[in-house]
Each structure stands twice: as structure tokens, then as C-alpha cells.
Amino acid sequence: MGIFATKSGETLAISDNELRQLIKETLDKAGGSFKKVLLIPPDITRANSYAGPITAMIYEMLAGKCQVDIIPALGTHAAMPEHELRAMFGQNIPLSCFKVHDWRNDVVMKGTVSGELLKEWSEGRVDYSVKVEVNKILFEGYDLILSIGQVVPHEVVGMANYTKNIMVGVGGADTINKSHFLGAAYNMERIMGQADSPVRKLFNRGVNDFLGDLPIVYMLTVMAKGSVSGKMEMRGFFSGDDEKAFLAACKLSQQTNLLLLDKPMKKVVVYLDPEEFKSTWLGNKSVYRTRMAIADGGELIVLAPALKEFGEDKEIDRLIRKYGYHGTPATLKAVKENEELRNNLSAAAHLIHGSSEGRFRITYCPGPKMSRQEIENAGFEYADLNETIEKYKVATLKDGFNTVNGEEIFYISNPALGLWALKEKFV
């Protein structure tokens, strides 16, 4: 059918009333009357997507008319405790509606994407096959599955969401591990901000070939921080049952979430909101969302007050601590020589994503839950958080270029909101 409902514009700020109408239009186009509905929104790490309020609105519309289940698209992330569920989805949805995705144990295999295709898509960089594994709940008789989320530049697939929300968000270990490594091997900087990539081809093939009988409808947002309000505003809403809605959202995201610079940044200061960023698994958005714009010999300073771990999955956390962020050659060598890393290729991909490849310094400034030794053992430099915040007062810095004590810095208040790159590097 294609696009069900859409409203978009580079300067728009879609209101909640307008959003409710777009949601209603989507539900009507999807059939209008349902017995059993599954919602797949992101977790708290994607709170800026506005998927929380959207989920609450859908529940309000459908509650009492049909069964509504909600499974946050955790991927490898930790399960959401009650306070996170309430913070993101509000107070009105019963906790019994929420299901937890376990990427290691709760999945079923529905098919395999061949190594021949992976070799073709990756230009020979990988040649393994990929199992299409997704949470078994998707096959429990739902007559509507709503995949909800934000389209924004992404390090693994190019642009977040759409089929990624299924294949990774509620996907299994083989799918997650091998898709992440595929993107890293192909070269993240060839992927970020692009609607098409080898990883997107994998996700689309997996959903279209093996999950095509599922009644999946996508609700996609494009978000940006208002220049006047300083708050997140919805620039676009797109819904539909195929890639048309996704491609339209990508075009708007490229117009609103990409900041292309004329000159490289010598010093970048990134703040990681303590409610959103507690691990380098997520916090390294500060690295891979900026490294296409940082000068050789430059420095990235990451202010991470709530940092407490490297990976949200215990095994991945252990592997990150063991092998560290030392760039592509060192990581590929470690993968070749160590079975434990070959069995967790998403961890290996993350080690590549989180490195500067030796081009610039990465200085992490953690709070009290992460020590200097842990930071330095992982391959980063360390600086004291309080001293650094005293120098770079985030309360007074504006996003973009600032002058601090005669020094030019580039400040980013949330690295999850976009992609920063040199014009010459973004093609």
C-alpha cells in the first residue's frame, strides 16, 4: 500500500493534536479494527524519538477495544526498569503490557541470508551467511504490528529504524552480531547518513523474504532541536508498510540531522546526558557521530557523568574491557586470533566504531562509577570530570562553535541527534 500518513517540513514542529490525527489515519489505513496489537517502540536510549508519547497515544486509542502488548526494541540493551518505562511511556499503560526482549534466548530462526549475497553487498569484505532471528512474540497471532521509531544517521546501517527496528531491535545474536560487523568491515564512514548500505540490504532482505507474512506497519519520526525553543521538535511523521515512508523520512533527516562543515574541528566537547548515556556502547556516539569532522591531531572530550560500564550486555562489557578501542587493524587481528570475539562480532564492530583510528585523541571524563584505570585500559585518555566541566561550562555553552579562554571549541549537547561531517567527506 505504501505511505499511510505523512506530514513533514524542515521548519515544522508537529503538535500533539496533529500527531494524534496522523496516528488515527495510520490505524484506519492499517485496518481500523483489531483484536491483538503488538507495539515495538525503542527503549529509553532513544527517548528523543518521541516514540514514548506515540506509544502512549496508540494505547489510549486502542485500550479496551483490543489486546495491546508492547515490546521495547532493546537489541542488546538492558531491560527497562519501571522508572524508565514510566519516564518514557507515561503513567497510564499497565506494566503488564510490557514484554522484555532477550536477544540470546527468546528468538526463533526464520531463514538465512546467503554468504554469496553478503560477499556481493560488502564488496568481498565478508562472506558469511546470516540467520534471520527475531523474537518469537511476533508470531503469536497479532493482526497488527506497529514498529515505532526515529530516522536519524546511524553508524551500523546508515540511517536508523525501519527494518533495523525488527532485525536488531527484536533480533537474535547471529543477526545482530553479523550485521554490526558487516557495517564495520564495509567502513562506517561510507555508510553513515546514507539510506542504502550493505547492512540495509541485509535487513530489508531478512524482513521481506522471511517475515513478509507479518502485518508490520512502520511509524517513523524525524526529530530536531528547535533553534528558539531549545527542545526536541518533530519535523516529520511518516507511516506505511514498505520502504516509501522510510525513504521519505531519510530525505528529511538528511536535510535536518546532518551538519556539514567547511573546516575540520580541532577540539570537540560532547556532553552525555546521565539519563540516556551510562555506557560507552551508547556514549561512543560522541566518537562515531563526530569523527568525520574532527581534524587529524585534534581532540574529542567526552563528559560522561553517569558512565558505569562499557557494554550493557555483560559478555560484551567483558570483551570491550579485554580488547579495548584500538582501531580497525588491531580489532581485525583480535577477531582472527580469538574465538570469543568471533562469536561476538557486534562487540568487535563496536570496538572499531569507538576508535579514532589513531587520528585524534579521545578523552573520557567519567563520573564516580568509572575509574581512571578502567578508562585508560580501554584505550581512551582520562580527565577529571569536575575539573573539565569547570573549564567547559556546559550550562553556558551553545551547540556549535564557542570560544573558551581564547580557544575555539565545538560543543555538542547530545550526540544522538545527528551527524557532523566535513562536506568533502560526505558524498
Image (spheres, grey):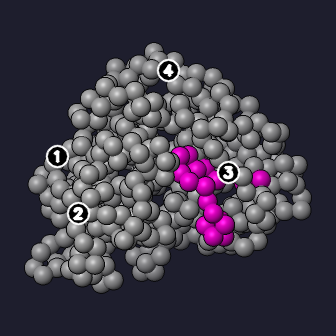
> Disc 1 or 2, which lies upstream in sequence?
1
Secondary structure found at label 2: strand
- Quadrant for the N terminus, please: top right
Q: Mark 1: which amino acid?
A: Gly
From the viewer's side, name the closer residue of 70 and 191.
70
Q: Relative to 137, is 190 on the left or the right?
A: left
Q: Which residue is mark 3?
A: 100
From the viewer's side, name the closer residue of 97 and 337.
337
Q: Mark 2: which amino acid?
A: Tyr
Query: Dots 4 and 3: beta carbons under 8 Å?
Result: no
The quarter holding residue 157 reads: top left
Q: Mark 3: which amino acid?
A: Val
Q: Tell me the CA gap for discs 1 and 4.
A: 32 Å
Q: Tell me the CA gap for discs 4 and 3.
A: 27 Å
Q: Which residue is mark 2?
A: 382
* Residue shown at the point (47%, 18%) measured from the top left: 115
Query: Dots 1 and 2: beta carbons under 8 Å?
Result: no
Q: Which residue is mark 1?
A: 358
- Quadrant for the C terminus, please: top left
> Disc 1 or 4, which lies upstream in sequence?
4
Residue 129 numbered tag = 4
Residue 369 in view here = yes
Q: Position of residue 56 (x, y in %)?
A: 71, 66
Q: Relative to 402, is 79 on the left or the right?
A: right
**In the depicted structure, whether residue 192 falls above or below residue 303:** above
Q: Give the class, few, some or many, for how many residues have Cα within 10 Å of label 3's Cα (few <14, many ≥20).
A: some
Q: Relative to 386, is 110 on the left or the right?
A: right
Residue 194 in view here = no
Secondary structure found at label 4: loop
Secondary structure found at label 1: loop
Q: Nearer the viewer, mark 2 or mark 4?
A: 2
Q: Tell me the CA gap for discs 1 and 2.
A: 16 Å
